Structures are given as C-alpha cells and as structure tokens.
Amino acid sequence: MKYGDWSREFTKQGEEAAWFDEGKATLILRVRQIETGIHWAEEPSSRQSHIISNVRIVSAKPDIASATEVETTCRFFVYRNRLETETDVLVGKRLDTLRKVDGKWRICNRELLLDQNVLLAKNLTVFF
C-alpha cells in the first residue's frame, strides 16, 4: 500500500479473489454493458448518491507546481437504493494516482479500501 499503514488484511493482487481487480479494458466493457439498458444487476436502475470528502494530495512528482503526476487520497460514502427494500451503504478510502495528459488531469490508477469486512451488497455496479 502506497499511503499510510491501513493495519488491515488485504487480498494479494493477482493471487487471491478480489471484489474489483479491473483495468481500463474491462471497465470499458462494463460501461458498454450498462449503457445497453439490458443489465440484469441494474434492472430496475438504482438510485445512488456519492459523497467524496477529505481530498488530499499526498505526493507530487517532482513538486506540486510542476507535477505531471500526483497521488491523492479521499474518503467516500455511497448510498444506493433499488426496488422497495434493497439499500446499500459503502464507505471507505480511495487512493488515486492522477497524471497530467494534454493539460488535463486523468486517473491512471485507483485503489479502494472498503471499511466493512463483509460485503452486504448483492452486486457492485457502482463506480467509485
């Protein structure tokens, strides 16, 4: 882990099962599937609210004024409701690596750590 000591047990990348372990290609496919309107996990569609807070720049290479890449952290709160009784609350930390491309900041890496030990949601169609 790049930022801080989370003092938690983690899934070993590439060796064990993970809730998310996706790259750009699989994310593009997921978005295309959802946009078709024929996605069983989102039929009917969820209502979602996202709250992002405590955004901080934790490192910049070489310094913030001339940086072309920065690492940021934040906290997130996601509330999702669908049908009459399905309600999910997802809370956690996020570490993003941003890279300046053509004068705009783009996400080149994102790591998530959910605060819950057991995932109670039936599916994860949420983009954090």
Image: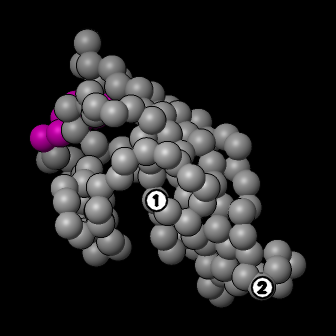
Q: How is the image coloured?
A: one colour
When the figure is inspected, residue 27 is found, relative to residue 101, above or below; the finding is above
Judging depth in this view, the residue of 86 and 42 nearest the camera is 86
Horizontal side of residue 98 vs 44, given as left or right: right
Judging depth in this view, the residue of 79 and 39 nearest the camera is 79
Q: Amino acid at mark 1?
A: Glu
Task: Indicate whether residue 4 is drawn in magenta.
Answer: no
For the point 28% across and 75% down, the residue is 25
Q: Which residue is mark 1?
A: 111
When the figure is inspected, residue 67 is found, relative to residue 9, above or below; the finding is below
For the point 16% across and 46% down, the residue is 39
Residue 44 at x, y percent in the picture: 22, 31
Q: Amino acid at mark 2?
A: Pro
Residue 83 at x, y percent in the picture: 24, 19
Task: Indicate whether residue 41 is drawn in magenta.
Answer: yes
Q: Which residue is mark 2?
A: 62
Horizontal side of residue 124 vs 128, given as left or right: left
Res. 48 in view: no
For the point 55% across and 40% down, the residue is 76
Neighbor class of circle 1 (other Cα within 10 Å; few <14, some 14-19, many 20+) is: some
Q: Which stretch is magenta?
A: 40-48
When the figure is inspected, residue 118 is found, relative to residue 62, above or below; the finding is above
Residue 46 at x, y percent in the picture: 32, 31
